[in-house]
Amino acid sequence: MERPVPRPITAEWLFRAAAHYLERYASTTANLRRVLERKVMRRAHARGEDAAEHMGLVDATVGRFVELGLVDDRSFAEGRLASLRRRGTSRRMTTAKLLEKGVEKALVEELVAADETDELTAAHAYAKRRRLGPWRSRQRGERRDRDVAAMIRAGFTFPDAASAIDSEADTGEA
């Protein structure tokens, strides 16, 4: 049984698709553009059309949402930075995640530099969330090196990782 041919790609359809996406997720302009481009490519492929013909609609739709104030890279980045740092994400990993979402590098550097979260506090929060070091229920001594390595892979420096892993569970809680 063949699938029915999807409806044509229109500005109205793209606007509704973007609005539906933004109802569920906060987004940057670059991320919204990627999402809409994928939608257009899938529908154009199913219709046997060239997706490049419709990329102007994607740019217009993203521009419209920026005009309406529903997509704001700065507020997205500020909120995401605060959320990531609260849950114990290192500065290095936070920077990478914001860049991955399409936030401009200059804005990321500005916001990360202004962030007042201490890296050691974030390391403690990460260790607690992942149940490493003092929050491990058993085999703490045997697993120390693995726990420190996990913290380093998460973007923390060795001194911060070792300090969080070697501390007592009641200190440094975030």
Image (tube, grey):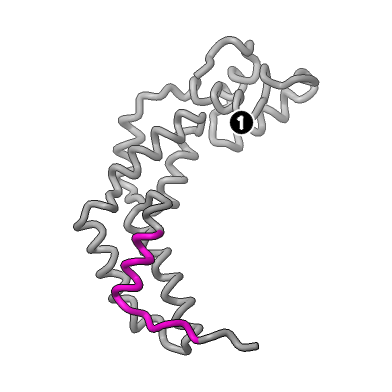
Q: Is residue 99 above or below residue 54?
A: above
Residue positioned 31% across, 30% down in the render: 114
Residue positioned 47% across, 82% down in the render: 6
Q: Amino acid at mark 1?
A: Met
Q: Position of residue 93 (x, y in %)?
A: 49, 39
Residue positioned 44% across, 71% down in the render: 39
Identify the residue under disc 1. 151
Q: Is residue 19 left or right of residue 160?
A: left
State the count of labels. Answer: 1
Image quarter of residue 49: bottom left
Local SS, label 1: helix
Q: Is residue 15 above or below residue 164?
A: below
Q: Is residue 69 left or right of residue 129?
A: left
Q: Which residues are magenta?
A: 5-20
Q: Position of residue 139 (x, y in %)?
A: 80, 21
Residue lying farthest to the left in this orientation: 67
